[in-house]
Amino acid sequence: MTLLAVLINIVLPVFILIGAGFILTRMMPVNPQTLSRLSLYALAPALVFSKLSQTTVSETDFAQIVLFTVVGTLIVLLLSWIVARVLRLNQSLESAFMLTCSFVNHGNYGLPLVFFAFGQDGLERALIYFVTGAFLVNTLGVFIASRGHTKASTSILNIFKIPMIYAIAVAFAVNATGFAVPDALFKPLQMAGDAAIPVMLILLGVQLAKTSWGEQLPLISAAVSVRLIGGAVVGLALASLMGLTSVTRQVCVVEHSTPTAVTTSILATEFGTEPEFVTGVIFASTLASIATMTFLVAWIG
């Protein structure tokens, strides 16, 4: 995969939607919290349900991808916590730093990238990573985001206020039992799910238009380094340790090395956990990933 192919087929479409949100906010008042709640409580759960209930992957591959996603995320989470402690960040910034380093853009960035690089087989495996990552960001991610301003017990309870975890549980049940969801119900859920990614990207553009993060560039650079370089190193090492091979290895490593998840900006906005810093890391890591992901895909492809 060449740099030009990545730019034209993956990065450019993403930045067109980000730009739309940016320009819209410059032209009229836009409330980012309204968009974040729309995504968090409606569109994202619909996306996960519509994808998970339709996927077909072998039990072995399924288990390997889930294990890789969970363990890999926890390792990077630990790494980011160590770096945050070394930098002596306050609790709110520490939570934001851990969010941006640990949770990747496995959906609107990772899925098209994997499909372009590894075809339909890769895409089916990427969906498993996507669903597992979505579960983690909407459980562990919610806890980390909300701990910056609430007690630990309240943070744990916040997990159960997010409908994503219930969408995942129902989708698993539908997939396992082979239950045929009526078209009258599935089609609107699928339509809502299809709207999730562009709304998330437009939200990012809205936040960028309201954000000034020049003074945070050193800390943003540190987070981007942990996310892109640390994530790739951890992914390659873990894949080797688990004995992953072929397309499963390729998909897991690539997904684990993608830039910071747009969802983290939604969580940061919802819980007031340094949203300007989080937005800066999302933007910077996405730009920097042009180089890192091109190199990585060419290397393991």
Image (tube, rainbow, N blue to C red):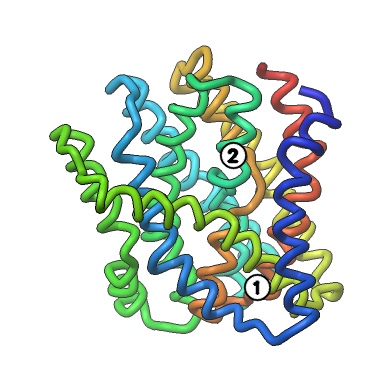
Q: Position of residue 128 (x, y in %)?
A: 40, 35
- Give the quarter of the figure containing the C terminus: top right
In the image, farthest residue toward the bottom: 29
- Would you say 18 lies left or right of 198 here? right
- The count of marks equals 2
The amino acid sitting under disc 1 is Leu
Picture layout, residue 244 above or below residue 205? above
Determine the residue positioned at 64% across, 59% down.
Answer: 201
Mark sitting on residue 32: none
Picture layout, residue 65 above or below residue 42? above
Q: Position of residue 81 (x, y in %)?
A: 56, 59
Q: Position of residue 194 (x, y in %)?
A: 48, 51
- Return the residue at label 2: 110
Q: Position of residue 276 (x, y in %)?
A: 69, 75
- Would you say 276 lies left or right of 82 here? right
In the image, farthest residue toward the top: 246
Mark sitting on residue 89: 1
Picture layout, residue 229 above or below residue 165? above
Q: Is label 1 or label 2 in front?
A: 2
Mark 1 secondary-structure assignment: loop
Mark 2 secondary-structure assignment: helix
